[in-house]
Image (tube, grey):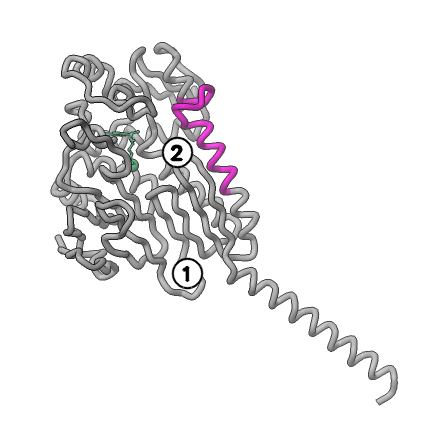
Amino acid sequence: MNSKEIRVISAVLLLALAIGMIIYRLSVREETPGTESFFGMNTIMTITAYGEFRDEALYSAKLTVSELENMFSVTIPDSDVSKINTADGESVGVDEKLVYITETALEYSALTDGAFDITMYPVSKLWGFDGGENRVPSDEEISEVLKNVGYKKISVDDKAMTISVPRGTGLDYGAIAKGYAEDETVRTLKNLNIESAIINFGGSISMIGSKPSGKPWVIAIKSPEGSGSAGTLALRDCSVVTSGKHERFFTDADGREYCHIMDPNTGRPVESEFDSITVICDSAMMGDALSTAFYVKGWEWALSYRSTHPGIELVGVSGLTVYLTEGIADSFTPAEGFEAVIR
Ligand code: AMP
Ligand code: MG
């Protein structure tokens, strides 16, 4: 071999090594998750994503969530929602996303006989669920405040992009905004070619694809006792959203519990033998609105809704029994001490 041949072979070997290194680095990047955890919308939010552009995707997703929070929050004084709530009946110009989510919320109110209602804010406030002092109000206070409640009081103009509510009525997107933010996060990640990710916004979980190994994600259903699990679901590419009494509640002097989900018919916290109801479907916003509504309406009503609206599976926890619809039953493994019942 002459020296020219040696130089060519060395160059080829170096090039092969460099290409190998790049491929290795990319595959490590594909298999190593990027995780972002932050506080938003009153809860801990965690996003884990795999893929080449995971860091960029996580950064954009976090920005998306904070932008939405600044729009939807009832506690940020200059959010679009706070402006509507303090406009004394005047129309307020808002972001088109708020118009869209409000119209969607109104659709779910109509679909659930008004069980889902974003005008419950004055009632939640009365019971101290706005961050104030929790207390049991009098019947008179409740009926006074209920006069301001009702989704039909909301006026949306989707041409002028304005929303208004009468004086005294207040909007609270707490039962749908997290789901919407999660759907937006999924879209943001997918736009950056993420094919494997899991997003957990405080009880609302969405999955993109499966784990990088091809195995399903494992989602725990909370035990009524709080920290433990009632069982796990092995799932891919869907959203799992739970509403339940133990997310937020207070106990009176007699030990009676009052939860944060309000029945629009009574102006009182829902009393249910179910600790939680979980909706599994392909949109976190839909799951969010429906799980809240189903918690108000009850398990049997949820089953009948499902019979006319395909694409929804349900999990209901009542003490040590976990009720499941047939489409999800095979994915569920009960935790020790819990019994799974297919309904
Ligand atoms: P979620 O955890 O999604 O079920 O949402 C519950 C939150 O939505 C509560 O903390 C309130 O802010 C608000 N909310 C309470 N009752 C209702 C209701 N019936 N419809 C819509 N939002 C409600
Ligand atoms: Mg909800």
- Residue designated by label 1: 211
Asked if residue 289 lies left or right of residue 36, the reply is: left
Per the rendering, the mark at residue 73 is: none
- Say which label, 2 or 1, has the lower sequence index: 2
The residue positioned 37% from the left and 34% from the top of the image is 177
Asked if 277 appears above or below 341 in the picture, the reply is above
Q: Which residues are magenta?
A: 61-81
Name the residue nearer the viewer: 85 or 128.
Answer: 128
For the point 20% across and 58% down, the residue is 329
Residue 187: x %, y % from top left = 45, 45
The amino acid type found where label 2 is placed reads Asn
The local secondary structure at tag 2 comes to loop
The residue drawn where x is 48% and y is 44% is 188
Q: Quadrant of ligand 1?
A: top left
Label 1 beta carbon within 8 A of ligand 2: no
Number of other residues with Cα within 10 Å of mark 1, as a class: few under 14, some 14 to 19, many 20 or more: many
Prevalent SS, magenta region: helix
Label 1 secondary element:
loop
- What residue is shown with label 2? 42
User: Are circles 2 and 1 on residues that touch, CB within 8 Å?
Assistant: no
Can you tell which quarter of the image residue 174 is in? top left
Residue 138 in percent (x, y) is at 16, 16
Q: Nearer the viewer, residue 260 or 195?
A: 260
